[in-house]
Amino acid sequence: MNVAQMLDRLRHDPKFTAHLTTWRTIPARSARFAGFPEGLNPRLVEGLKQRGIHDLYTHQRDAIEAALRREDVCVVTPTASGKTLCYNAPVLDAIMNNPKARALYLFPTKALSQDQVAELTGTIEGLEVKIGAYTFDGDTPASARKSIRSAGHIVVTNPDMLHTGILPHHTLWIRLFENLEYVVIDEIHHYRGVFGSHLANVIRRLRRICAFYGSNPCFICCSATIANPGEMAERIIERPVRLVDNNGAPAGEKHFLFYNPPVVNAELGIRRSSVKEATRIAAQFLSRNIQSIVFARSRLRVEILTTYLKEAVRRMGKDHNLVRGYRGGYLPTERREIERGLREGRVMAVVSTNALELGIDIGSLDVCIMTGYAGSIASTWQQAGRAGRRHDVSLIVLVASSAALDQYIIGHPEYFFDQTPENAVIDANNLIIVTSHIKCAAFELPFREGEAFGLDAASTAEILDYLAENRILRKVRDKWHWSAETYPAEDISLRTAAPGNVVILDTSDNGRVIGEVDYFAAPMLVHQNAIYIHQSAQYTIDRLDLEDRKAYARPVDTDYYTDALLKVDLKVLDRFQESAAGEAMRCCGELSVTWLPAKYKKIKFGTHENVGWGEIHLPEQTMHTTGYWVEFPQEAQAAFAGGDEEMGEALHALANTLRQVAPVQVLCDPSDIRAQAMVRAPATGLPTVFLYESYPGGVGFSDKLYHHHEHLFRAAVSLLSDCPCKEGCPSCVGPALEIGAHGKAGALKLAAMALTAKPKNEQ
């Protein structure tokens, strides 16, 4: 049975269609060709034709022409549209015309790097020229590194390796930096928030070193569909880019279904498990030998789904190896073997985290099932792009969970299909991040008087003087030199704004490192007696040493996991901007956030019931970050008959709802933003709801939320109004214990006050 026949069966299955909120058909698209540009090396054109590429799509031709003219380019087309050729062609052309020319490729993951080298090697073999293309990452053996530095025409790496392994050792890479013609940054939409803010600083350091060696490379960036790809590329490379988005690649017909599992408890707003529903749907395709991919939001969910699907396959009398899991934590050899199995058709269903969202070559699958909303429109389309060959029909099913964000999206399909994808946000000049990279840059090359690093020259000099006062740098005449004994890049993770992570050590296995967590998240995740889960194995934390940045763990087998409860205090340090919003006031500024993990809950697997609690004994932590908040007038209290208690429930409910819809408004992960409600905020004494960033200094989400205030509150009202529960539930305002009996109604009252024009249901 093929996908078209399966679609027909689903259409006539009332038990299935009763739970659909939308069935969108995206029509097939024909290819648009444009031929090869003049000036492209004839041997390269011939080599491409031998590989079956007899013509270029319109976007490929435009991108290659712009790159040959030495313009910086950003190519934005869907998954599987041939973006790779947009940069491989100009790079190979440059090296064929000048054997000394070099190129640097940056991919966000090692798996993508391996993938690209395999494809490049295949293209190069057909050209009958000697071009060395190599990956250079943490897995590259020491014996191969020297030859890559001297013979590598194309060095394929990731931002982390460029940051710690290449730029600080630029004197070993003179041949690369003197002759660097092209820098390719693929999957640029992936570099949002903290990661993107770090990458922009790494690119500043790269360009600084290139200038020292006399080169000025051209940048070619590639992105999936986001609202501001050109702006994002320009913020990362800090130069104007030519945007190429006239996609000429063909696509087969796609069917996109939104499926909301049935309600099992209407009062509490609890629905049937999205994991079980996704398993049931995926099993139907497995039974008919239709190849599919199932996405899950967490590593734990991947393991649970894989287990359930393997059991389903065994019941069908088939080999359980037809189903494989795929996520971070698997060995590289195992991941390559799964990818090969998918391409060759030996694996019929793969269950993955967003690790397979990126463009790793796994062939084209027929069906994509998402267990829960991916967190952003851009990521959802990326995952959906995994299904569908160029001419065949494909199916995508989004199975919603009970989470408020999922329920908002599933209940508002028009928002998802009619909106442009979100804006990606970065802040390259976050003080903590830029200071970290100025240290790295000073280690690489001394700073000269009047030199600017992202900031203006005066601000750069201020930071350099501060580092000199702390004996990290030494100023001699008009230059700042590195003087500390440490090696700065190794202490700076590109994935977090906090310097250094906390490593988790298995005390039963000679202190083997089993994982690491962000320094600021450690008190929540690896406090004493916490259950830490890694590759489905459970560990209990015996001790957390924040000073030494180590958590000591040992294996256990429990039927519960832990969830820490935070006591948070906020202080407003500075108001950057404020303006009236209805009867309320919206603000954006700098906050001091002090938090103390007070106790933790033990939550049973499966039923999620609370089976106990314990106290956490750790010092309080303080972080300066940016936030967006809404202050309600003192008179708002009169609207609540129950006084402070009822007002507190309403503020809590609104804070929970806003935190759930905020990631839809700005392209960020739900964990990037935290919420706090106060009946009487310090300094003002006013009822206030705060949304603040999880990273020191913030990376721009707060400013975005401030300017999206109206959209944000309308989305919150829509989620609350459309939820069928009477008094609030996990799908809109959060757990009933936190928001009380009147939380939902109170949140709607407050939201109406903060809107310039009242929502229809309030007029």
Image (spheres, helix red, strand yellow):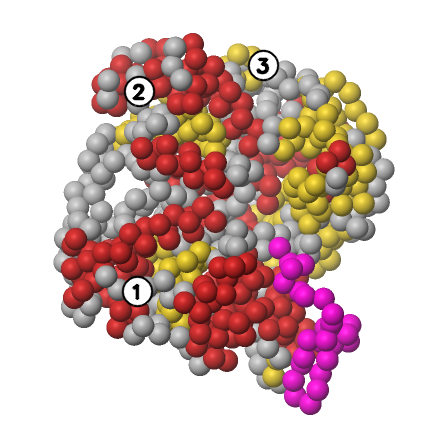
Give left or right: position of 389 versus 673: left
- Could you say which quadrant of the image residue 71 lies in? bottom left
Amino acid, disc 1? Lys
476 lies above or below 578: below
The residue at 78%/20% (across/down) is: 612
Residue 103 at x, y percent in the picture: 38, 66
The residue at 22%/38% (across/down) is: 390
Q: Is residue 270 magenta?
A: no
Amino acid, disc 3? Glu
Looking at marks 2 and 3 on the same chain, the residue that comes earlier in the sequence is marked by 3
Residue placed under numbered mark 3 in the picture: 267
Secondary structure beneath label 1: loop
- Could you say which quadrant of the image residue 393 lies in? top left
- Start-end of magenta stretch: 467-493
Looking at marks 1 and 2 on the same chain, the residue that comes earlier in the sequence is marked by 1
Residue mark closest to the camera, 2 vs 3: 2
Counting other residues with Cα less than 10 Å from the Cα at mark 2, is it few (<14), some (14-19), or many (20 or more)?
Answer: some
Residue placed under numbered mark 1 in the picture: 130
Q: Total marks drawn?
A: 3
Find residue 163 and name its label.
none
Residue 470 at x, y percent in the picture: 78, 72
Residue mark closest to the camera, 3 vs 1: 1
Amino acid, disc 2? Asn
Find residue 289 and name its label.
2
Quarter placement of the N terminus: top left
